[in-house]
Amino acid sequence: MAATTLSRRRFLIRMTNLGAGLITLMLSIPAIGFVLAPLFEKRTRTWVRVGEIDSVPVGLPTPFTVAMPIANGPPSGPVDRVVYVVKTGDHRLHVLANTCSHMQCNVHWDPSLGQFLCPCHGGLYDVTGHNVGGPPPSPLPGWVHRTVVDPASGRTVLEVQNQYDERI
Amino acid sequence: MLRFLSRPVTTRTRSAYRWFDERTGSTELLHKGLYEAVPEKGGWAYTLGSATLVLILLQLFTGIFLLLVYTPSFSDAFPGLDYLRRSDRFGSWVRGMHLWGAYVLIFVIGLHMLRTFLSASYKRPRELNWVTGALLFFLVLGLAITGAMLPMDQAGYWTLVVVTNIPHYIPFIGDGVRHLWRGGDFVGQASLTRTFAIHIWVLPFLLFAFIGAHLYLLRRHGEFGSWVNYEVTGADPDKELAERIVRAEPPYPTRRIERMWAVPRRTVDFFPDQLFKDTVISVLLIAVIFVFGYLVGAPLSEKADPATLSYVPTPEWFYLPLDQVLVLSPQTYLVFVGAFALVGAGALAFILLPFLDRSRDRAPLRRPEVLLPGLFLAAMLVLLTVLGASRLYSL
Amino acid sequence: MNAPSFLPPLASTVSPQPIPTNLFGNSSAVAVIALLHIQIATFITGSSFLLVVSESISMARNDERHERLAHTLVKGMAYVFGFGSALAILWVTWILLGMWGTFFVALGRITFWAFIFEAGLFVTEIVLLYALYANWERLRAYRRVRLGLAVLLAVALWWQQFMIDVVASYMLTPNGGDTNQLAQILNPTNLPLTVHRTVGNIAWAGAILAGMAGIRYLRARRRGAGAASETAFWDWAGVWGAVWAIGATLMQPWIGYSYAKDIQLHAYPSWYRMMFGDLSNVFLMQITLLGLIFILGTVYFWRRMRASETRGRRTQVLMLVVLVLATLLAATPARFASTYAEAAAADQLKPWWDGGLLNPIGTMIPNKIIALLAMMICGLVSVTSLLRAHSRGELHWGDATRGAQWLLVALTLTVSSMMIVMGVIREHSRQPFLVNGEMTIQGQKVVDPPPTNGVSPGSAP
């Protein structure tokens, strides 16, 4: 005889607990996996044509509206986003998203201020997108972009990818 | 059956009811529910709790009708609601009642919290009542803000963008939380689907679970009322208290409580005294929602345009304090301090109030060390709302 | 008007006009009378609030101390009201009409409705205040009437302040003469100013009560053991006043910051002047005074708790240390804090330890915000700790030391100084305009000063 006997009662309780544990496991593995999967899903990056940027004046951020495809998740239609094209005097090109780095409200270029203004809390960014006033903690995000010269017309075409670059 | 039908109507009704009662025990249930003792004084103040319940049920009711016409689709949500606004007078009335119901609900919950805070109804043994109530408050706020995101007009879309962005300020897990809520890095169709699911299932399920707990606890310990119900006037307080405890009607005497607060001086029956007052207040509140839902209705701006350069996102009035805190928490890590640390600490202190309040008495003026910080917090919320409204709506 | 112009760094936005140097010309007389009027008016308005609170408590609890305090407040208000009214009348008739006539008439045309309320409410207050004062004992049998009169008086006083705020905010952020009442009430700097002043009134009334209680306590103490009930009462009144003074001031950091934010958005040159320009050192004084209010409050609570040997004194000492550090942090001069734009313009985008102009550790923002937050939290903990000791019954009235009472007097003087400095800042931030961007002080002079620099009087420069 074993020194400690397992009573029938305790055995039943333990088996019930085991069963409950199994049910929990079988329910939670798919559920938690389902909930957390989007974090690990590969993003689909697509290049989207913005337009010809030769006529964009220096020092004046010019908005373009682009239908940006979504990068992951169930398939659905593209979402319209704004791409601000800025040419600065030192021949540099900045391609900015109009998403405020504070609360992601829509930022717009205000000519009377000479800066980007966020209407939500008065955030201000200079012409290169650097945060210079108000609550925003970091500069305007930039779109990953490339310029392509159209062989037929010789004009510069800008393309952006549906992701921000590392400036944020 | 023929014998049944040949009897007069009144006896038929009575025996039909008796048949039903034998099988369900409904009379006994009703008696236990309706004839419970409640404190005599202050009844009008205690109506706020039942008013909250009625308003929540009203939201459930109007919400069901909206569910019959709403499509949680990025492109189809707005046209459906726009159709309601332009062509379906009763539909837009229901939608207006749903919105005004939410506004009035939040206001009434605020008053209810203030009342229970002032009367110290959260002290032993009713601490869990307060904790479940505090969680209910946050669930209602969550329901309100997720509901605001659903119409997919400009206001709804930008609310979705901004509110889903807030979690990203949490260190380490923030980006993940934002991604999970949005179903992606940017707001898209998945964000709407998730928000819709949260609004009509996840939060209501939690809400009703906690409401059940809240009401059960209330019935178990009895309505505390407020300090005015417990005065001891006789020459021999101990004798008076002992007599009260002996004469107490259920659910009194409350167990695990100081003798002084175990039984109110005088009680009345819940039905009809308290229920009458509850009904009057509920009628008034629903009337307000009824009228405002029709006359003012629920606003609907233009269809959502993620590429807009001119729309100014404006928070709902009950989010103005947080918005004003965000204006005043500029740059760097202060956004986290303002939006999470401060607000989080305040929320935690709010939920854990019964455990922080070590005062001895229950009358508000006898516990100034709790009353004044509480009033300070309430005053700050009101002032921040006023300042936020002034900033957004100034001419 | 609304578009702030983002100027070259550290430049003054409006070149100062030459101001004639006689007493009336340089507006000193105006300043003295205005500041004195404000000290009295805010005391009366704040006291009416404390009066309602004390009267309500005395009715709810049959509390004699609160009844005596309410009566003391009514008497104080009545005594001061006469002088304050005479000052206000002098202010309006001689200063505003006599010296700044064109301005006053122009402003009156735009905000006439507010002045009608001012006049009517003035009469209402006289009736209510003197009715209360003269019939205090007689109304003892009718407590609800007495409370009702006090409530009406408080409402009338607050409404009067609200009306004058409409006028004052118009002066800072005018809207081009729009006489629409709603547009004036919803002036972007109106509600923040009203909130700021309402809370400040209560703090000031509490501070005066505290200081007065301190002095009366000392006098009663000198009379010896026979005046024990007197010392007990004034000791209690001093604590009560200090709790209100500190308690109301707790909210001011957020409120003041909100107000400054609205000024930044709608009257940028004034804001720039206050924060970075020639007024920034004056504002530095202001923020130091704010810190001093909290420090004095905490020291007073500490000493008072020490006198009665209550628990929780260590909390007060800890709060005191943090408050001193917070005040030092808040008093960062503007010179140490260049904005990114200024550093970029001066081509000095390097940290200051590398010879540049940037301060990555933190500039005005967030250092000053952190300091303000710390002040608010420490003040709250300090007041709560005192109230806890009171609830435990550990504070014995009459125990207070003489030194603690002088701390209360210092608190009163600090709050008073803060209000004076605020007035100086307010007027100078707008200078030389009386109505920002529209009417200058010179542009409306009725009394001809000797012409200077070839600028002829009466012409708007």
Image (cartoon, coloured by chain):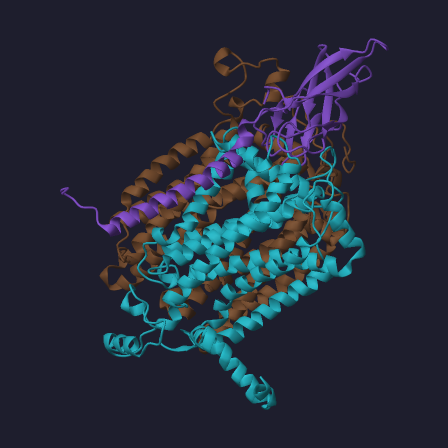
Chain colours: A purple, B cyan, C brown
Vertical position of residue C108 compared to residue B121: above or below? above
Considering depth in this image, is C143 or A143 the residue closer to the camera?
A: A143
- Seen at 42% across and 46% down, the residue is B348
Q: Nearer the viewer, residue B303 or B287?
A: B303
Residue B80, visible in the rendered structure:
yes
Residue B384 in the image, given as x and y percentages of width and height: 56, 47
Q: Nearer the viewer, residue A10 or B260?
A: A10
Q: Position of residue B242 (x, y in %)?
A: 25, 76
Q: In this view, does A104 lie to the left or right of B225?
A: right
Please report the residue visible at 42 percent of the width from the left and 63 percent of the height from the top.
B216
Quarter occupied by residue C28: top right
Q: Is residue C34 above or below residue C284?
A: below
Q: Where is residue B186 in the image (x, y as percent from the top left)?
A: 63, 31
In depth, the one of C282 and B75 nearer the eye is B75
State whether residue C24 appears in this view. no
Q: Which residue lies furthest to the right in this view?
A: A153
Which of the image's four quarters has the N terminus of chain B?
bottom right
